[in-house]
Amino acid sequence: MRKKKYTFIDLFAGCGGLSEGFMSSGHFQSLAHVEWEFPMVQTLRNRLIQRWGETEESANKKVILFDIQNTDELINGHWSEDSITKYGKNNADNVSKGLKAIVGKKSVDFIIGGPPCQAYSIHGRATDKHSMNNDYRNYLFESFVKVVDYFKPRAFIFENVTGMLSAKPGGKPVVERIYKAFCDIGYKTLCPEDFKDAVFDAYDYDVPQHRERVILIGIKHGEDFALEDFYKNLSFCALEMHKTVRDAIGNMPPLYPLEKVIKDKGRYVSHQCNGEDLHHLPRHCSSRDIEVFRTWIEKNMNYCSQQEAIDFYKKVTGKSTLYRKYRNLEWDKPAPTIVAHLQKDGFMFIHPDINQLRSITVREAALLMTFPMDYQFIGNRAYCYKMIGNAVPVNFAKAIAQSLYLTLK
């Protein structure tokens, strides 16, 4: 007899890292995914078809292109003219009936997701003159709460950056706002002062990068499993063996610099393009970039002081900076956190091989996030880097799912 799987809705689904981990655990199946950026929606729909056996019609219905801030419309349908104009043509015809119609009579066991983290990010607050206090993303958790309140799942999983622990939009700690919002709708979570105990590093869960995140579980009052058991199980699922950059991308075809930059189909090309994987194409690097990468790796400048790194950038570009601008990956260490900034440049993700003198490709970034090799990202290169950097590493998501399953059992 086929084993029953638990159901979930994924909010702020992105390109599907969290969903992929939950489904690949073998214990969960999705009912719906909500995302408001079209390349991510296309990517996730395609993945459901190619890997998870959905029909095109089913995938188009399940993955909803919509702004979760319009929560009542998202749940109930009856879209406004503005919503129809923005999202109608890229959704299946009946999606405008809302999440309620898509879920139908099925029970929603869990709701999972991670609201965009830029407003909680310490770096984001440091570089914004208002410390992100006026950023609408501070309050996107309220939309998450509304969806949980409507469907009343057994529990929810809420993932976010550690910067949320110190964020105080409007002068009040966001952890207190989140705690109260979930308490008010009948869910038990950790107390605000204990949120720090919910910080886990993806590196401990078969992911070749350091990536600390807050993993918050909320359990509906009356359920027969406990917060403490989930966190014990998540700690238990941590691995003693750790993956490195070499484990993740060491077997990728090398992409060496050309003797001379060429122009191909209107684009400048600085490196060889090997293989058939369109995600493993090198970014164009100027001759200056190539020499910078060579010098950086030769002189082992990852370990220079902050001031030396700043002076180096000034010497190279003639521009001033307050931060390091270059860093290379190291073969036998984990990567640093893969970030969405990769969409702008790859100077902080220089390939470790001094003979290649380039930044990492989209496929290499995806492998460092433990996306399977056959995962296809739809969109231009910048969007692919962005969606990968914003995702939850698949192996980490799988460990979270496995921990939840163990807790239920």
Image (cartoon, helix red, strand yellow):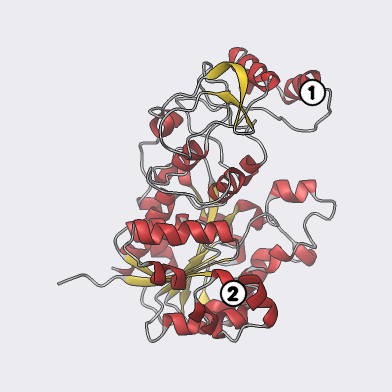
Determine whether 58 is above or below 94 in the image. Answer: above
Q: On the picture, is 222 further left or further right than 163?
A: left
Q: Quadrant location of the N terminus? A: bottom left
Residue 88 got which mark? Answer: 2
Give the amino acid type for the residue marked by disc 2 in the picture. Answer: Gly
Question: Which residue was labeled with disc 1?
Answer: 317
Residue 304 figure quarter: top right
Percent x, y of residue 393: 47, 49
> Looking at this rendering, what residue extends furthest in the left direction?
1
Choose mark 2 or mark 1, whichever is in front.
2
| Residue in the image at 47% along x and 46% along y | 202
Percent x, y of residue 171: 79, 64
| Residue in the image at 47% along x and 35% along y | 280
In this view, the residue in front, 97 or 103, is 97
All told, the count of numbered labels is 2
In this view, the residue in front, 367 or 275, is 275
Percent x, y of residue 143: 62, 74
Determine whether 216 is above or below 32 in the image. Answer: above
Percent x, y of residue 63: 48, 68
Neighbourhood count class around disc 1 (C-alpha, 10 Å): few under 14, some 14–19, many 20 upward: few
| Residue in the image at 53% along x and 81% along y | 98
Residue 103 figure quarter: bottom left
| Residue in the image at 40% along x and 52% along y | 235
Element carrying mark 2: helix
Q: Quadrant location of the C terminus? A: bottom left
Whether residues under marks 2 and 1 lie with C-beta atoms below 8 angstroms apart, the answer is: no
Give the amino acid type for the residue marked by disc 1 in the picture. Answer: Thr
- Distance between the alpha carbons at the discs numbered 2 and 1: 46 Å
Determine whether 93 is above or below 189 in the image. Answer: below
Element carrying mark 1: helix
